[in-house]
Amino acid sequence: MALTGLDIYKLLPKTNCGDCGSPTCLAFAMRMAQKKAELEECPHVSEEAKAALAGASAPPMRLVKIGHDDHQIEIGNETIMFRHESTFLHECAIAIETDPGDETPLAEQAKQIAGLTFERVGQQIGINLIAIPDDSGDPAKYADAVKTVTDACALTPMLMTTNPECMAAALKVCADRKPLLASATADNAEAMAALAKENGCTLVVAADDLEALAALTEKVKAAGCEDMIVDPGVRETGAVIERLTEQRRHALKKNFRPLGYPSIAYAAADDPAEQLLQASAYIAKYAGVVVTELREPWQVLPLLTMRQNIYTDPQKPIQVEPKLYEIGNVTDESPLLVTTNFSLTYFTVEGDVEASRVPSYILVVDTEGTSVLTAYAAEKFTAEGIAQALANVGDRVKHHKIIIPGHVSVMSGKLEDESGWEVLVGPRESSGIPSYLKTVWKP
């Protein structure tokens, strides 16, 4: 069980010096118990106390790293079961399998998978891993396949073989990329653990049930490999979610260290639509790595979008900087629109302004990352706030006209009084902006 604040307090120096940022040692101990402070923040703690607290104060789920340099990703270290309790900390990785039986050459498959990157609400989102299954059982052939893929793209490889000889051969051509090794089983655990330890790679550990999985992680850990991802050993959707949930509860609620690792889930349905649903479910509950065969952009973008939304801090919405943005080659006669600094709202408006091909200004007001109606209801998108923002526009526009969202037309009169600008009521939906700018707007 996790240590209580009083348990931790007994091991602290009890000087109440305040050097850690807390007024007393007891307050610091309580913060540590709540996972809000780290032991390193206390400069006076003894080496004996550090040793005693090291294991107990470690996160209930281990943080593991996959890949290297700019392609390195971190998963795990989660502390909650439900997103609304705080936030999920590390995005799950999405891996796409290559298909050795596909008519498309392996190198072309790799380039296609690596090209699955998109921009959404101002952020780049994309695939993290390229999974390479071993379909031959021949070390030389598998190493050639891995080399073909790694030569064709910069993605971190996920080596999918239970044959230690094939794994060793593949590592000779890609160990510098710190690939994910999948998988260690009861039959090959010692050999796979040795390869993972030797090459500094994270190892997937697979077993048929949680009891066997816990025993296997302890065996692999004893062999010197501590960075692991656990495979629940089932593939049917409901069973996978049940097993992932149970494993996470053991790790977070019971602090059961043998299962305190991020997990992996395989979307294996034959039907692409069903596989898409599987992968979506695993992103939400609670996979650290999701493996799928889907590779069409229209299939992958929904998965990346769901991941982005699930792993956004619900207490800190994605925001853009409140300021005046220029879209196109603007002049002092260009239209001026106003909106909030919620990223999804801003980038939707920006896209529709670009689609109109009418160079325009967009004035973004600080609403703490909330949408138009939400901000208006919370009195964060007000006539006074917009008028204050307009004061910073200066002489950028000469016409002194501002277009407000149609949903807040009720503020038009007050905004005119506050700012002295002429207020035009724009469309209620962003999709109406192109037509509005082309047919209604006149400087």
Image (cartoon, rainbow, N blue to C red):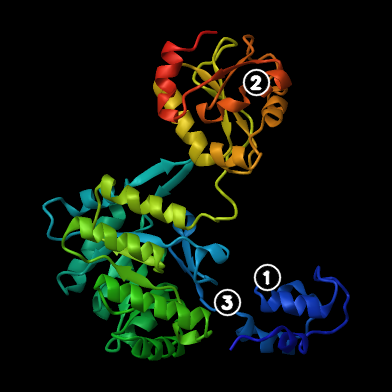
Expressed as whole percent of the image width and height from the top left, the position of residue 388 reads 72, 27
Circle 3 packing at 10 Å, graded few (<14), some (14-19), many (20+), is many
Q: CA distance from mark 2 to mark 1?
A: 48 Å
Precedes in sequence: disc 1 or disc 3: 1
Q: Is residue 353 in view from this perspective?
A: yes
- Tally the numbered discs: 3
440 horizontally vs 320: left or right: left
Residue beneath the point at 43% across and 89% down: 218
Residue beneath label 2, please?
A: 413
**Residue 341 falls left or right of residue 121:** right
Amino acid type at circle 2 is Gly
Q: Nearer the viewer, mark 2 or mark 1?
A: 2
Q: CA distance from mark 1 to mark 3?
A: 11 Å
Image quadrant where one finds the N terminus: bottom right
Q: Nearer the viewer, residue 121 or 415?
A: 415
Three-letter code for the amino acid on which mark 3 is drawn: Pro
Identity of the residue drawn at 45% across and 57% down: 310
Disc 2 to disc 3, how far (Cα)?
55 Å
List the residue tagged with mark 3.
59
Residue 394 vs residue 45, the one in the foreground: 394
Q: Which residue is mark 1?
A: 36
Quadrant of the rendered image containing residue 100: bottom left
Q: With respect to residue 276, does 186 lie above or below?
A: below
Q: Position of residue 440 (x, y in %)?
A: 46, 12
Q: Residue at x 44, y 30 (%)?
A: 429
Question: Does label 2 or label 1 sit earlier along the sequence?
Answer: 1
| The disc label shown at residue 273, or none | none
Local SS, label 1: loop
**As drawn, 163 above or below 270:** below
